[in-house]
Amino acid sequence: MDQVIKLQMGSLYYAVDKLAEGGHIEAVEVIQSSDRPDKTIYRITDKGKELMEQLILQQIKKSDPPYHPLYMALALSRHIDQRKVERLLEERIRETEHQVNFAFQVYEEHISIVPRSVLHLMYGKYEHSLTELKWLKRLYEDVVARKLNETGNPITQ
């Protein structure tokens, strides 16, 4: 899940507390042990199911423009040492190649065990990684050729 969502433990506990306070989940069992903190098992309430549906539909409807940390850096990268940019892009390409392979492996390993909706999430991650890799390689070619300062030449595929 860490490939899909950024979540910190403190945030998770806070969310569980808020959901319980709002009547969206309720404790069904507390497991006590002398060697670790108590473990509480929750179930979702009917009110919680309604909220979950509402939140899922909001996320499906949402159309936020994509943000990429490289966007601003690219706009200014022509002003810095291109060899440094080249080296960093080589590293990013290697990392992204790993992400592509990992995303496809995760997808393949889960075909027979997760719902199709989750497969779409996994395959979408794979496709986004592939697109990122293609983009980085094209950018790298321009950096190597020292073309970042050129104007009037369209980027071709």
Image (cartoon, helix red, strand yellow):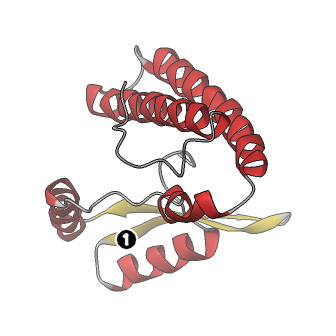
Q: Nearer the viewer, residue 139 or 63?
A: 139
Image quadrant containing the C terminus: top left
In the rendered image, residue 46, in percent from the top left (x then y), is placed at: 18, 64
What's the residue at 19%, 59% (across, down)?
63
> Which quadrant would residue 89 be assigned to in this image?
top right
Question: Type of residue at label 1?
Answer: Glu
What's the residue at 75%, 56% (across, down)?
81
Q: Nearer the viewer, residue 143 or 91?
A: 143
Q: Is residue 18 left or right of residue 144?
A: left
Dot 1 crowding, Cα within 10 Å, few <14, some 14–19, many 20+: some
Q: Is residue 92 left or right of residue 133?
A: right
What's the residue at 56%, 36% (across, down)?
142
In the rendered image, residue 37, in percent from the top left (x then y), is placed at: 74, 70
In the rendered image, residue 93, in percent from the top left (x then y), is placed at: 65, 33
Element carrying mark 1? strand
Q: Nearer the viewer, residue 36 or 31?
A: 36
Q: Is residue 83 left or right of residue 99?
A: right
What's the residue at 48%, 15% (across, down)?
108
In the figure, 66 relative to 125: above or below?
below
In the figure, 130 relative to 47: above or below?
above
For disc 1, the marked residue is 26
In the rendered image, residue 27, in percent from the top left (x then y), is placed at: 44, 69
Extreme residue in the right direction: 35
> Which quadrant would residue 121 be assigned to in this image?
top left
Extreme residue in the bottom direction: 21
